[in-house]
Image: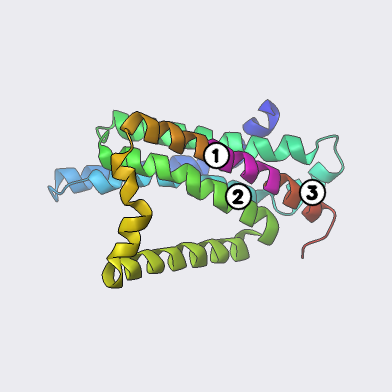
Amino acid sequence: MLAMLRKDLYVMGRYTAYLILSWLVVTWAATRFLESDAGFLYGMLPMFSLTISLNSISADEGRWDRFAAVTPLRPWQIVPAKYLFAYGCLAVMTALAALAGGGGVKLWTVAAITPLVLAMALPLLYRFGRQRGSIVLLLFWGLAAAAILGSAHFRYDLIESAFGWLEDVPAPLLAGGGGCALLALNAGSILLSVRFYTRRQRGWYG
């Protein structure tokens, strides 16, 4: 697994460096010359880990996948390494944003939401590939956003009845329950990804 992590770091290292450098330049320019609130820029950095992780899977499509198919490596070894790489990127990006001075509510909210997006995105990529998987993910989140905004505008009572009870739940209990739900979701995500990756190696998906 460490060898696969080193491979991902080698493949995505230059792209990641350029991405972070561009973010630093834009953030510095926004705070130095535009004198604007850069809070949203700090919140963007954890989301970059999602881009890096998805691109690492896209980079494997083709040569690496064909090579891995004839090695002793098994899908249950390859796929969890991708998840470990994704969450390692998320931790590094969040820490970098916090050290740069963006340790606010927006940063930690985005950092908490990103694992949810990762847990949904990775199985889709292993099932449909990068292009179609991204389209399916965008359609899902677009429909979810439309449903939430539509309910908030036309039938706010539906949102209140569905989520209003959360206000009465103690914060530690809510955080613990959310963490457990996220762990369960990611466990299911890994199992699905292993299944889809195995079938893709066998040529089930075009």
User: Which residue was labeled with disc 3?
Assistant: 198
Q: Earlier in the sequence, mark 2 or mark 3?
A: 2
Give the image quarter of residue 129. Answer: bottom right
Task: Tell me residue 69's x, y (percent).
Answer: 83, 45
User: Which residue was labeled with disc 2?
Assistant: 122
In contact (CB < 8 Å): disc 2 and disc 3: no
**Gap in angstroms between the C-alphas marked 1 and 2:** 10 Å
Q: Secondary structure at mark 3?
A: helix
Task: Tell me residue 96's x, y (percent).
Answer: 36, 32
Magenta-colored span: 182-192
Task: Name the colouring of the figure.
Answer: rainbow
Residue shown at 78%/55% (left/top)?
200
The amino acid type found where label 1 is placed reads: Ala
Tell me the crowding category of disc 2: few under 14, some 14 to 19, or many 20 or more residues within 10 angstroms, Cα based: many
Compare residues 9 and 40 and report the one nearer the observer.
40
- Left or right: 123, with 182 as reference point: right
